[in-house]
Each structure stands twice: as C-alpha cells, then as structure tokens.
Amino acid sequence: MTTTHTEENNKRVPLMKTIRENRVAQGLLLISPANIYLFLLMVLPLLLVVVLSFLSRGTYGDVVFKFNPSNYTRLLDPIYGRILFYSLEVGIETTVLCILIGYPLAYYIARAPARQRSLLLFLILVPFWTNFIIRIYAWIMILRAGGFLDDVLQWAHITQGSLNLLYTPTAVMIGMIYEFLPFMILPLYSSLEKIEFSLLEAAADLGAPPWKVFLRVTLPLSVPGIIAGTILVFIPALGMFVIPDLMGGAKTILIGNVIRNQFLTARDWPFGAAASMILMVLTMVFTLYYTRKAGFGEDLLV
Amino acid sequence: MSEKKPPIWLRIYTIIAYLYIYIPILILIIFSFNTMKLNIRWEGFTLSWYSVLFRDQDIIQATQNTLIIAIISTLVATLVGTLAALAMQRYRFPGYAASETLMYIPIVIPEVVMGISLLVFFVMIHFTLGLVTITLAHIAFNIPFVTLVVRARLHGYDNAIDEAAMDLGANEMKTFWRVTLPTILPGVLSGAMLALTLSLDDYVITYFTAGPGSTTLPLRVFSMVRFMVTPEVNALSTLWVLTVFVVLLIGQIVQSRNS
Amino acid sequence: MKIYRFVTLIALMVMLLSACSAPTPEPTSVPSPVPPAVSTPVPASTSASTTATATTVATLKAPTSKSLNLYAWSDYVPQQLLDDFTAKYGIKVNYDTYSSNEEMLAKLQAGASGYDVSIPSDYAVDIMIKQGMLEKIDLSQIPNFANLDKRFTNQYYDPGNNYSVPYQWGTTALVYDKKKVPFEPKSWADLWDPRFKGRLVLLDDEREVTGVALQVLGFDKNSTDPQQLKQAEQKLVDLKPNILLFNSDDPETSIITGEAWAGLVYNGNATLAYREDPNVAYICPTEGCGLWFDNLVIPKDAPHADAAMAFLNFVLDSKESILITKEFPYSNPNAAALDQFKAADPADYSAYMAFPGTNPSDDFLAHTVAVHDVGDATKIYDQLWTDFKGQ
C-alpha cells in the first residue's frame, strides 16, 4: 500500500521543486545563460577560424575551399619567428616597465589615508576612461619635432635642437606604458591595500630595516597583484599594433600587424587565421602556466 | 592604517607620475582652442571647433550608437555574468572545469582574433552587420570580466551570514535578495563599470563587426585622428574627459554619502 | 543602493533620448523594389561634346528610397555635397569610411552588405568586377556622365563604364621641400642619398613603395618575378635608415612640420603641403610615378540602388563636382566642372592648374604607371613587405 503511494508522489514532484532541492541543477541553471551565449558567440566563431586556417586564398583574395596546411608551415619561416620574438620583447618590456613604474605609485596610494586614497584613485581612473586613441594623439603632439616637449626643453635652455623623439622605439614604449599603466596600478593597489600594515610595523619593530621589510614582507604579499597586472598588460600588449603604427611611424611590424595585414592588405584570410591560432595558443599556454603556478589573482579585482 | 608619512622621494615620484599621466590630457584640452587648423603650433584662441563639433552629425550619431551599445551590453553582461559567478563560486556541477575555461577564453584571446572570428561567423550565418552585431560582440567579451569581478567579491563572502539568515526563517530566495545581493552589490557594480568601460572604449572588435551607419565613437575618433587632425578632435576629447570626470565625481560623492 | 538607482536613471534617460532621435531602422535585408539597371554599354563615340546633353530630368526615374549608405575614403566627399543631395532628394546619407581599398575589399568580400555606393580605386574595381561584386550601371540614367573628360572614361578595368563612373583621379609621386633639401632630386634613386637620413616619409603601401624599388632597378612596377622582387626588397632594406615614417593618412603633416624633407605621397597630400608651404615641390621622377583613378560604384544587392543612381548622377553635376575640388585637392575628371570653376573662381582655378599635384603636365602623365592587381603574386609582395619591415 505504502509503496504505491510513494511512487505516485514521486511521479508528481514538480520541476521547480527538483531544482530548488537539487544543487547541481541550480548550478547548471545559473551557468547556462553564460555558457550558451559564449558557446555560440565565442566557440563557434573560433572553430570557424580554425577551419578557415586550413583553406586557401583565391586569386582575388577570396576564400577557396581547398585544403591547405601550408598556412601553418609558412609561419615557420624565420621572418615570422623574428616578428614573434620582437613582439614578445615589446610585451615583456612594457610589462616590466609598468611594474617598475606603477609599483611605487600603487604603494603610495595604498598607504595614503582613506580620503586621499579615493581622490588619488579617481585621478588615475579619469584618463583611464578616456578613449585611448585620443591619449595617443596627445602624445604625438607632445613628442613630435617642434612639439610641446621640444618647445619646453628649448625654452628652458636644456636642449638646443629637436629631440626627434617621435617615430622611434622610445616613443612607442612611452605610448605603451601610458596606455597600460592603469591596468597594472589597479591590481597592484588592490593587493597592496589588503596588506595589514601592522605586519610591516611589527617587522620594523623587530629590527628589520625598511628595505628588508619591503623585500621580505610587502613584496611577497603583493605577488597576486603583480600576477594579475601582468596578465592584464602582457596579453593585450602582445597583440597591440596601433601604438607602434601611430607613434613608431609604422616602421616596425608586430604579430598584431601581421594578422591585421592578412585580413586587410594581403587579403589572405586563411593565412591570417593560421597566424591568429598560433597567437591564441601562445597566450593560452602562457596564461595557463602562469596561473597554475600562482593562482589567477581574482581576489584582488574588487 | 599606519600614520607614518611616506618618504620624500616617494612623494616626489608620485607627483611626477601624476604629471606624466595628466600633461597629455591638459595639452589636448588647451589645443582644442587653437585657431590653427592643422594644430601644429599654437596660433590663437577660438571656440569655433566646439561649434563645429556640435554640428557634426557623424559624431552625434556615433555617440548615440556608442551609448546604446554600451548600456545594453553592460546590462546583459552584468546579469548573465553575475548568475555565472554565483554558479561558479557556490555550486559544483558536471562540466565545471569546461565552463571555467570557456569563461576565460575572451580574456586571453587577442582582440584581433576575436574580431575576425566574429566577422567570419556573422557573415557565414548571413547576419547583417550593424548595431546588433556590435552589441552581441560586446556582450560576449563583457561577460567574463563581470564574472571574474563578481567571483572575486563572492570569494571572500562568508556563507555564515546566509546561514544565519536562513536560521532566522528566511527561505533561499529571500536570503538571496535581502542578504546576498546587497552584500555583493559593490562587486556587481564594479563588474558593470568595467564592462561599461570596455564597451565604450572598444575599437578593434567593433571595427570588425560594424556595418553601415553603425559607427561608434572610437571608430570615428580613430579615423578623425588619422585623417583630419583638426582641433575638432581635441574638442571632442575635452568633452569626453570632462564627461568622464563629472560622472566619476558624481559616483564618488554618492558613494561617500552612502558610507 | 543609490548608485544602482542612479545608473538605472541614466540608462532610462539615454534610452528615451535615443528613441526620440533615432533614425527609423532600414530594412537592409530586403532590397527596395527598384527595377534592376539594364546595362547598355556606352559607345565610345559619344565622347564628342563635354557639355551636358539635354536629357530632361523627366526621363530619369525619381528615387523612392529615403536613405543612402555611402562607403568611401575618409575625407573624400564634402559635407556640402551631401547636404545638397539631401536637400534635393530628401534622402539622408550615411557616410561610413575606410582608409584603404583593401579594407573596403576585405569587408565587402567578407559579405558585409548594406552599402549603396562605394569609391574604390582602379585595381579594386577590376577585382570587384571579376568577382561579381558590383551592380551594373545604366548610363542612360546618368546624363551628367557627359560632363566627364573622355580621357578618363573607358579604362582597362571597366571598358564601357558598365560598372563604374570616375570620381577623382591623381598621381603618386615624389614630394620634397625645396628649402630643406640641399639638391634638386630628379629620380627615385635620389632618395637613397645619405643626406636624407631619417628625413623621408613614405606611404604605408606595399605596392607603391615596392614599385619604387622595382622601378629604380629598372623592372616593371607590377612585376611578379620572384627574383626581381627579392632584389627590390634588398633595395628597400638599404633605404631603411633614411625612412622617418610610413604614413598613408596624413603624410603631408610631417612635411609641413619639417620633420620630413621628402617622400612618396599622393598628389592630394602634396597639394595640401604646398598650400601651407610654397617651397614644396611635386615631381614625377625619371623612373616613373604612380597613377590612380577612384570610381563610384554600386555594390551588388545595394538596398537603395535607386538612390545610388541618383547620387552618381548628382556627383557628376558640374556645380557639385567643384565642391570636391575646392575641399580636397585631387584632380577632377569632370571637364564641365573645371570649365565652371574657371569661370566662377579664376584665382583658385589658376592655382589648381599651376600645381602639378592637381594638374600634372602631359610629360608628368607620360611617366605614370598604375598599380595593377597581381593576383596570386600578392602573397609574394606581402611576404616581402613583412620581411622588410621586420628587419
């Protein structure tokens, strides 16, 4: 008697109740909008690119459905190796300089009294929220021969002729740092802010000189911030081509340029797709390795 | 919080750093009043570029487009991203690792690659390029950032509060609305702000997914800077900076009144 | 909490504002019901007169579309012209821009649709016709076609003008500042002179720049010979120390500021520099220089083909055509417009005629060689360019 009764009950349990009681179902429900959306608009397009990378370029720059693995072998040519190497160089240089320049600034803000802190952060955010092309344009005006910097230095009698800074690798680096600095400062600040400064005071009280306190206590505790900042700077810097184009006089060619050129100038989409895949694989490998070693640093993004 | 004052070299360094950050902006603003069209040397003061700007239909259209795209994509991404963050921080389900990897793809993928893949995709399914495609693209890259930020906020969340609320008689839904959500709201808003910024400033992905009549402000600025570098660009930049300044300022004031 | 409400309020305000002034969405997927233009090749013999023939407007089909999507070079179509068009036909013009033929081709080849008029250069028109990307043009609907100087119609890429109508034309040659350069350059080879160290501005164009190297070596500018191209690349590498920057958008700026002393630029750039500095000279070097024609075309499946036809005819109107010349200093193929220009603005007209940028002499033109599409060899050029820049 009782078994039949329970069976009937089990059949009539409504869906909502199942969801409310089953945590797995709840989790799946919550994650599904994001999963579905990203699958449709991220995974599918990427799969198309993978397919595209194995096709061929038609005579007029169209895409021909002919299997062609040579797009990848073409990338083995030392030309591209050189470009990849140079792009990595630029990416690493930008990241390292951002860390060196941004760290003291982040430290100052983290240690500042609460009201000053809000103001200082606010001041960092204003240019950060301004369109980046506009900011690059401002630097072009400053660095060009006869531009602002030249005018000021000559007026102060520090230099005589023009510094001719624009269209040099130095100018490119100035632009890159300017662009990426906030991405480094904010995570650094976030992790520095979490440090209990009583810890530092305790270390100092125990007789450690300031530099030792910094090296042994502050720096290690801020590592999550450095990692998060590195990811936020290095990856976009790798694919960046606008700044070398505008401020470097388009004299250098980076991976981003190569890819962009394939889709525009050369109209060799399959080759561009192959190059994109390589770049993507590189960045994924880098991120996975880096985060596996030291955590993704998500705890500092608030 | 330590009351010790920072060393003098650090203070000087900070001032110089802020100067480095702000001098270009100041120069932009000053030169928006330059009479010289090619804007190479300072020649005289004028407000005319601002009136040119206000009569520029392309810019007005672009601004409208940019705002619509930014707001819609932010709203959708914030909603979807928050749900996803909750799922990932509090639940275990099959395919968890795959979901996490999926979530991180838009962050690690170079913008060029993402832009191109979306262009290829939309063309293949014969979806006309325009405001809709741009918005869809923006939502796609915004979701992971919102998720990341909200997850970070949830990470430090003490479930004991939730349990306490439920012990006091509230059911799950009520606990969520009255306790969880308000507590994670700063994280959600941070995520939303980040999404808004990314959308407003996006150039590469928008470039590939834009169609006729759907120019956005970054696209327009880019072509203005490359071709007709007149003080009109400076005028636009000045207004942009001022708007950002005012919005952030209001945000600050409201926030400080809250706490 | 308050921030939350604040943000929602702003969002609502923006939505309301945009709803008030947003243009009505165009049904871009369904082309407007316009009879497809029947192609009637224009026989070359109608080139006799340059004044507009008396085709009455009554025989022209009035456009029913309310908007036109124009896809053209940045800074190429005067706002005044667009406003005049809107005033005459009540058609709103959306002007989207690109900064190179390749950009336009890439987007249109990818399948981006919705554009009604585009302005590709000669070789791009060639590619587009071969790929069936263009609508045929019924010249009987474009009476102002007769205004054109017949030297510029019936070109290799579109004999009979079935698909395109000339817009502006120009040259790509050597510009230099007479005051800054210590000698008088006569050939491209002069650019390799060590006195030009860090003083050259070149178009960021792999075909034009490689073309210069090929010509200096005595080869054909449109060569597809890998050996010749290899040598050309080496020649370019030798030039590298002299190059200050590559810039296809506003190379004249660096000439005007004095950062660059000479370079390879479009005639329009050279003329703009000349307007600021009368010491600027523009010559066609002995090895040869470039020639280009930009043309109005109607991409296939244009949603407002009727408006497009009206636009093509409108642009060729002599009064409207002068607006282009006044604002953008390229060369105008519209003979009737130039006549009117001469009558209305004799001072500006003589300035136009005097400078080789806007009015190259026959000798200048005799040395021009246009860039042609090289088909599969494009890969070699691209690889060469990547390699050269990467060094």
Image: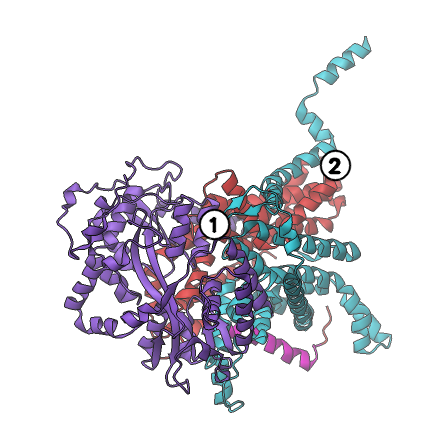
Location of residue C195 in the rendering, given as x and y in whole percent from the top left corner: 48, 85
Q: Nearer the viewer, residue B55 or C261?
A: C261
Mark 1: secondary structure: loop
- Which colour is chain B painted? red
**In this rendering, position of residue A277 left or right of residue B217:** right
In the picture, residue A204 is in which quadrant? Answer: bottom right
Task: Give the chain of mark 2.
Answer: B
Location of residue C164 in the rendering, given as x and y in whole percent from the top left corner: 31, 50
Residue type, numbered disc 2: Phe
What crowding class fits label 2: few (fewer than 14 Cα within 10 Å), some (14-19), or many (20 or more)?
Answer: some
Residue type, numbered disc 1: Tyr
**In this rendering, position of residue C164 left or right of residue B113:** left
- Which colour is chain C painted? purple
Q: Which chain is cyan?
A: A
Which residue position holds label 2?
Answer: B93
Which residue position holds label 1?
Answer: A60
Task: Give the chain of mark 1.
Answer: A
Q: Nearer the viewer, residue A21 or C343?
A: C343
Q: Is residue C62 above or below residue A114?
A: above
How many numbered dots are placed on residues in this image?
A: 2
Q: Which region of the structure is painted magenta?
A: B5-25
Seen at 29% across and 37% down, the residue is C34
Q: Is residue A149 above or below residue A82?
A: below
Distance in Å between CA atoms under marks 2 and 1: 50 Å
Q: Quadrant of the C terminus of chain C?
A: bottom right
